[in-house]
């Protein structure tokens, strides 16, 4: 469907996209996730042929977007960050214009405009000037424009920005409906949204793809760093002594609290459940355990971990750093 | 292309600009017509048109200013550039829409010679040819204005620069008389022009080899020609740059009834060049 090879985009000396590679397959919903300025919009603008790439190529159904732009663009519907609307036109006029622009044949034009009007729930406002529409409706007009003619690939840049919660839910439903027979790519900096709709997440940070997988797999990615948090009424040194009998613990970080208790985060080897052992260890030592809690890395943490590291670099190196600090603690 | 053409044309008449432009041009033509033809009884409408020429300086920037700068500001260019339409067709669609707006007052002008005819002798052939050339000159100005509009995001800047360029072209004959005529100044002038072209090529392509090549070969050619036959460079600046006084072709018709065919070819080539430059300017922005 779409193949992005070694894409580089420079704005002057600023590297907006840094050797991006990925493939997009048919019939799924893909989510581009990344903090502001990560290069999501730039990537989308290059994929749709609005911008040229400094290096690399984008193939849409086998057509290079730069060498055969007209052929490639036929397969794409694009909703940019700011919907490209001519505000002096009515909704109907605007959609008729875009239908003609996209080369939809004369006899099908009317029916396809009618169809997207229904799909985006714009029937009530079709005769109104776009200038007088609210942000939410404008977004929907932009979406209707992108979907018009039902191209194979629909690319949406932050489709739910500025919408109220009800509209967000409606648009999500619309996207799911579209995904039945189209490939949808959407970008967002809101994690919950991407997780909610997408089959596949690509996390972009500083112009690089730092992770790409299904939401579930991404969560498992950090399983290794599962921790158990405890709070015990004792000194840190005594706590370490008690826990020395539990072999599965690979690292302990302790923190002394003012009320005479100690908080500790325990690193566990190979995802074993050590809660029982910890409990009995403390019971045996007659030391009160006030809290016992497993802490699994959430998608949020993975996102932060991936996007905030100095190099935005791989999980592996991040883990190694942690190991080193633990060794110091022990 | 047809979709863009139709949308543009409709937008000119929905947003008043087209109507204001037409009303403006026709009103001034009417005033001149009344003064020259009706009151003074001069039978040539072409003479009236040469007076209206100055109204172009304000009128043309009015319709060209928004052509690309507004699209860029509202980000609607994203729609056009991601649609399965080539950039050349986008530019042509817009250009033809502006030309169509310009055609409306020119069609109205076609009535004026008939009014003169009703009152007595009229020189229809000269009048209609001058209206046609007047229209063609307008097309040249539109191409220049469109190019300048594609360079900026602000309609105001597009308007002012287009007005400035058209005004300089209008006053070109007067400016030209200040240019030196000796052979050595001719060589220097040509080299300066060549450098401007080379800098532009460098800006557009970013290729030092091509721009440097143009500059070096050009300078070498100038110097060699100067050494071999220096008389060639006498008055060359006035001759060469004199072609830029575009309106002269038109005023030749109105004042002397001479139709200069090479001038018409010059008009057409300027139109083609500026449409090409507009396409290049937009392309260039996608890559920077």
Image: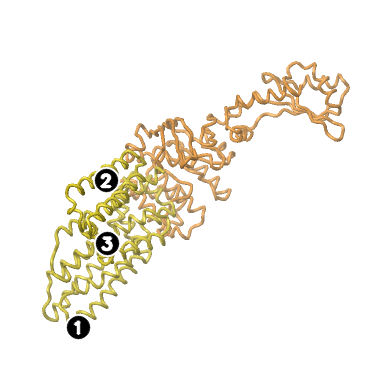
A288 relative position to A126: left or right = right
Given contact means CB atoms under 8 Å apart, are the residues at marks 3 and 2 in contact? no
Q: Chain coloured yellow: which letter?
A: B
**Mark closer to the chain start, 3 or 2:** 3
Quarter of the N terminus of chain A within the rendering = top left
Query: In the image, is residue B56 above or below residue B147?
Result: below
Q: Do pointers 1 and 3 mark residues of a single chain?
A: yes
Dot 1 alpha-carbon crowd within 10 angstroms: few under 14, some 14 to 19, many 20 or more = few
Q: To which chain does the residue with label 1 belong?
A: B
Residue identifier under label 2: B219
Query: In the image, is residue A36 above or below residue A271?
Result: below
Q: Which mark is residue B40?
A: 1
Q: Is residue A106 visible?
A: no
Tag 2's secondary structure?
helix
Given contact means CB atoms under 8 Å apart, are the residues at marks 1 and 2 in contact? no
Colour of chain A in the rendered structure image: orange
Tag 3's secondary structure?
loop
At 31% from the left and 56% from the top, the residue drawn is B6
Q: To which chain does the residue with label 2 belong?
A: B
Q: To which chain does the residue with label 3 belong?
A: B
């Amino acid at each position: 469907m779409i193949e992005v090879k070694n894409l580089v985009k420079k704005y002057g000396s600023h590297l907006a996209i840094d050797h991006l590679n990925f493939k997009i397959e048919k019939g799924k919903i893909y989510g581009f996730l990344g903090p502001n300025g990560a290069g999501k919009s730039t990537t989308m603008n290059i994929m749709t042929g609005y911008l040229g790439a400094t290096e690399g190529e984008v193939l849409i159904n086998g057509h290079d977007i730069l060498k055969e732009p007209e052929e490639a663009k036929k397969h794409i519907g694009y909703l940019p960050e700011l919907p490209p609307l001519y505000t002096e036109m009515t909704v109907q006029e605007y959609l008729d214009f875009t239908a003609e622009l996209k080369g939809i044949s004369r006899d099908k034009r009317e029916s396809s405009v009618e169809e997207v009007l229904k799909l985006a729930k714009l029937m009530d406002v079709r005769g109104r000037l776009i200038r007088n529409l609210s942000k939410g409706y404008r977004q929907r007009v932009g979406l209707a424009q992108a979907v018009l003619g039902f191209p194979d690939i629909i690319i949406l840049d932050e489709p739910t920005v500025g919408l109220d919660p009800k509209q967000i839910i409606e648009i999500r439903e619309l996207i799911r409906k579209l995904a039945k027979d189209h490939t949808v790519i959407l970008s967002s900096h809101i994690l919950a949204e991407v997780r909610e709709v997408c089959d596949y997440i690509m996390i972009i940070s500083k112009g690089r793809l730092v992770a790409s997988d299904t939401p579930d797999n991404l969560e498992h990615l950090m399983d290794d760093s599962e921790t158990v948090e405890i709070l015990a009424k004792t000194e840190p040194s005594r706590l370490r002594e008690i826990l020395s009998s539990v072999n599965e613990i690979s690292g302990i970080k302790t923190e002394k609290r003012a009320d005479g208790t100690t908080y500790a985060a325990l690193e566990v080897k190979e995802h074993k459940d050590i809660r029982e052992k910890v409990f009995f260890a403390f019971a045996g030592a007659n030391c009160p355990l006030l809290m016992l809690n497993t802490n699994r890395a959430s998608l949020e943490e993975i996102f932060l971990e991936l996007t905030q590291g100095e190099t935005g670099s791989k999980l592996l190196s991040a883990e190694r750093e942690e190991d080193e600090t633990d060794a110091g603690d022990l | 292309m047809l979709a863009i053409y139709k949308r543009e044309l409709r937008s000119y008449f929905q947003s008043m600009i087209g109507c204001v432009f037409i009303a403006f041009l026709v009103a001034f033509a009417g005033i001149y017509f009344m003064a020259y033809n009706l009151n003074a009884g001069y039978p040539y409408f072409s003479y009236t048109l040469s007076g209206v020429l100055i109204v172009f300086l304000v009128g043309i920037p009015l319709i060209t200013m928004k052509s690309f700068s507004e699209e860029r500001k509202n980000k609607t260019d994203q729609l056009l550039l991601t649609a399965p339409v080539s950039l050349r067709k986008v530019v042509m669609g817009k250009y033809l829409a502006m030309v169509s707006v310009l055609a409306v007052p020119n069609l109205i002008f076609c009535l004026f010679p008939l009014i003169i005819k009703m009152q007595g002798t009229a020189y229809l052939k000269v009048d209609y040819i001058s209206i046609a050339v007047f229209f063609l000159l307008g097309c040249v100005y539109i191409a220049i204005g469109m190019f300048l509009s594609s360079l900026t995001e602000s309609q105001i800047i597009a308007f002012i620069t287009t007005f400035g360029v058209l005004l300089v072209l209008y006053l070109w004959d007067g400016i030209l008389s200040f240019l030196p005529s000796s052979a050595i100044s001719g060589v220097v002038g040509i080299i300066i022009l060549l450098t401007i072209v080379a800098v532009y090529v460098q800006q557009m392509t970013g290729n030092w080899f091509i721009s440097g090549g143009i500059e070096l070969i050009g300078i070498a050619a100038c110097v060699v020609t100067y050494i071999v036959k220096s008389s060639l460079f006498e008055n060359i600046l006035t001759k060469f740059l004199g072609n830029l006084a575009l309106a002269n072709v038109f005023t030749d018709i109105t004042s002397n009834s001479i139709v200069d065919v090479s001038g018409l070819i010059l008009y057409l080539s300027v139109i083609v060049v500026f449409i090409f430059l507009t396409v290049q300017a937009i392309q260039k922005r996608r890559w920077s």
